[in-house]
Image (cartoon, rainbow, N blue to C red):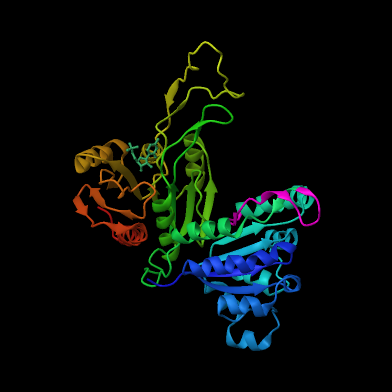
Amino acid sequence: MTQQRVLLIISGGIAAYKSLELVRLLRKRGIAVRAVLTQSAAQFVTPLSLGVLTEDQVYEDLFDLKAEREIGHIQLSRQADLVVVAPATANILAKMANGIADDLATTLLLATDKPVLAVPAMNVRMWHHKATQRNLNQLRADGVQVMEPDDGAMACGEFGKGRLPEPEAIAAEIERLLSSVRPEPVEAPTDILNGRHILITAGPTHEPIDPVRYIANRSSGKQGFAIAAAAARAGARVTLVAGPVHLPTPAGVDRVDVETARDMLAAVEAALPADAAIMVAAVADWRTADAADQKLKKDGSGRPAPLTLVENPDILATLGHHAQRPALLVGFAAETQKIAEHAQAKLAKKRADWIVANDVSGPPGTSVMGGDANTVQIVTAAGIESWPSLPKGEVADKLIEKVAHALSSPRD
Ligand code: C5P
């Protein structure tokens, strides 16, 4: 396995000293770290100590011509699997949110095509300032993962939210994000979907019961996100309609975040026309008849509040019967028995071209839901193709190749 790599951008705040411990923990986990210091961060940690811990050159200034000659900033921004900004000051967050690139760190952040994790740390008032919150919302909408700061005593003597999370927690979050990133898409097909628009749904939906409770399922979104990433690598314009998941937006993908099945349907219809639609989301079949405006309370009678469910729209079937039906419509189906038979029935009912049936009946520990591997059968009018158990990234690449082939073949 190739070693995973993090580009760690350290911006200037008192919490910068914790980045040394973070580097140590990442190295201990077998992750390579290349560090970049902003000018103010260099006041808090020295390039020498970082260089010793990373066992690599430390990059500091955009106009370091020698470094630029040996490794340009574009290259530097792309050689990692994940870019981490920790600590991220209010200042660097503001620059990131506005696309400002006036030093090496912010230039790398603008040039990268890799997922980005920001770990803010700042004074509590700066954290709660409307400008900072606005910038954070913008960054989240742009696909940046933002880790929540801790609450507590601050170096400046104040108390509240804004402390850098403990290095152990940051390292765990980095490890989690890296586990959903494929290290090297070297063999991925390229350009086979140039000029195509591929619409993908992924993840679960959340159906509110009241303002704090909801109905959900265990879908992690990994398979759908991997398919979106593969389609983008293959040159397609990709719209990914995602339910609530904790996954970074794959490079080159337009992501629309939704909560409920009805929102997902609206986002899918708004994204039409598309050449192909791949509906991977585990859409909740039912929602509550009317979600309560206020939190439901126990009334002391011992009887639970009644929960009336109504059926959600079937997004795949709606597309199957839509005036703008995509030329190729692919559904997914999690089955535990009579996989092919159920998938055949679904093909007809939902007017889909293919159903990718995944067997979720495996022995404990091999669960498809949330796991990294998948065993699928592709059910079409022509028959059934069974694929061996593969990492979800490989299922995605194979499926995208098959989609490209189908779109380029004349249909009868
Ligand atoms: O009927 P079942 O839920 O097993 O069908 C699964 C397929 O249908 C998946 O492709 C899923 O995304 C899609 N689906 C949908 N809307 C629903 C339920 C399922 O698009 N309400």
Span colored in magenta: 142-159
Residue 401 located left or right of residue 385 = right
Quarter of the image for the N terminus: give it: bottom left
Which residue is at the front of the view, 345 or 299?
Answer: 299
Give residue 298's position: percent from left, percent from top. 55, 18
User: From this viewpoint, is residue 113 visible?
Assistant: no
Give residue 161's position: percent from left, percent from top. 71, 48
Which residue is at the front of the view, 322 or 37?
Answer: 37
Image region (quadrant) for ligand 1: top left
Residue 310 located left or right of residue 296 = left
Give residue 281's position: percent from left, percent from top. 41, 44
Number of numbered discs overlaid on the protein picture: 0
Which residue is at the front of the view, 128 or 191?
Answer: 128
Q: Main secondary structure of the magenta part?
A: loop
In reply to whether residue 144 is colored magenta, the answer given is: yes
Q: Quadrant of residue 107?
A: bottom right
Q: Quadrant of residue 217?
A: top left
Give the answer, above or below, for where 351 lies relative to 139: above
Q: Residue at 29%, 46% (x, y): give it.
A: 364
